[in-house]
Image (tube, coloured by chain):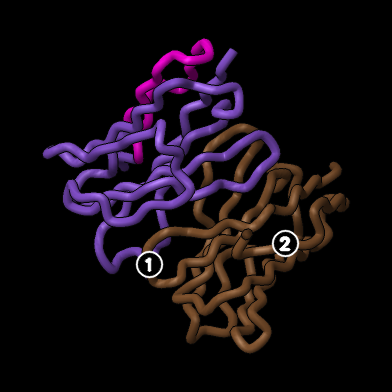
Chain colours: A purple, B brown
Amino acid sequence: AAGVIQSPRHLIKEKRETATLKCYPIPRHDTVYWYQQGPGQDPQFLISFYEKMQSDKGSIPDRFSAQQFSDYHSELNMSSLELGDSALYFCASSSGTADLLYGYTFGSGTRLTVV
Amino acid sequence: SQQGEEDPQALSIQEGENATMNCSYKTSINNLQWYRQNSGRGLVHLILIRSNEREKHSGRLRVTLDTSKKSSSLLITASRAADTASYFCATDANDYKLSFGAGTTVTVRA
């Protein structure tokens, strides 16, 4: 079965550079969530989109922006990268009330290293 | 602040033993979910328990939920070396975003 696809798997950037992370949800899932997990930390919610509109916002820095496109894939854009942005970035997708039964499906994540 | 707090932070057991970890949370929830994460890998959903449920089973997993105490436990029975991973509880407060606990690192010794 198709899962949540994230690309790239690994990314190395220098300070002050820009990074773009992509997430392709499970087919027919209309909601995408982004989480950030620092080294040894628990995942923290960043932002979510439902039907291409931002639905909720968490602890996402102003340097980050995200959007969901007409094909429901989402991109997380991170500018002026800082060393502290080094983390695993997860995307999850869901569809309507199926959440209550099945939980969320996460992608394998993008490991961003800022040097 | 973290919605979910987990204990213990780390657990080391022998293969075949049971592993129990606990999670406490602060606000009302719609459901509570448990996830597994192998080192540096993705989060894998294990089990979801709704706020009106008290206990749920899935294979070797048993989850309990006590909404009066705002706590949940995850029991892994007859553990295997392959169960070695970090386990996170995550609460969904009906706003469709998860708040994760700090996680319990489980090491199963062969």
Q: Position of residue A21 (x, y in %)?
A: 37, 27
Secondary structure beneath label 2: strand
Task: Indicate whether A59 appears above or below A6.
Answer: below
Label tally: 2
Q: In whole angstroms, how far apart are the C-alphas of marks 1 and 2?
A: 22 Å
Q: Is residue B68 left or right of residue B91?
A: right
Dot 2: within a 10 Å radius of its alpha carbon, few (fewer than 14), some, or many (20 or more) residues? many
Q: Amino acid at mark 1?
A: Asp
Quadrant of the image occupied by residue B57: bottom right
The image quarter in which residue A39 lies: top right
Dot 1, how many residues are within 10 Å of its Cα: few (below 14), some (14-19), or many (20+)?
A: few
Tell me the residue that label 2 is attached to: B6
Magenta segment range? A4-22
Q: Can I make out residue A5 in this image?
A: no
Tag 1, which chain? B
Task: Tell me whether marks 1 and 2 sit on the same chain.
Answer: yes
Q: Is residue A30 visible?
A: yes
Q: Residue at x 68, y 53 (%)?
A: B102
Q: Quadrant of the C terminus of chain A?
A: top right
- Residue located at (52% from left, 79% from top): B28
Determine which of the numbered discs, if any, sits on residue B95 in the image: 1
- B56 left or right of A64 in image: right
Identify the residue at image location x=33%, y=50%: A48
Is residue A7 in the magenta section?
yes
The image position of residue A36, as x and y in percent, is 51, 40
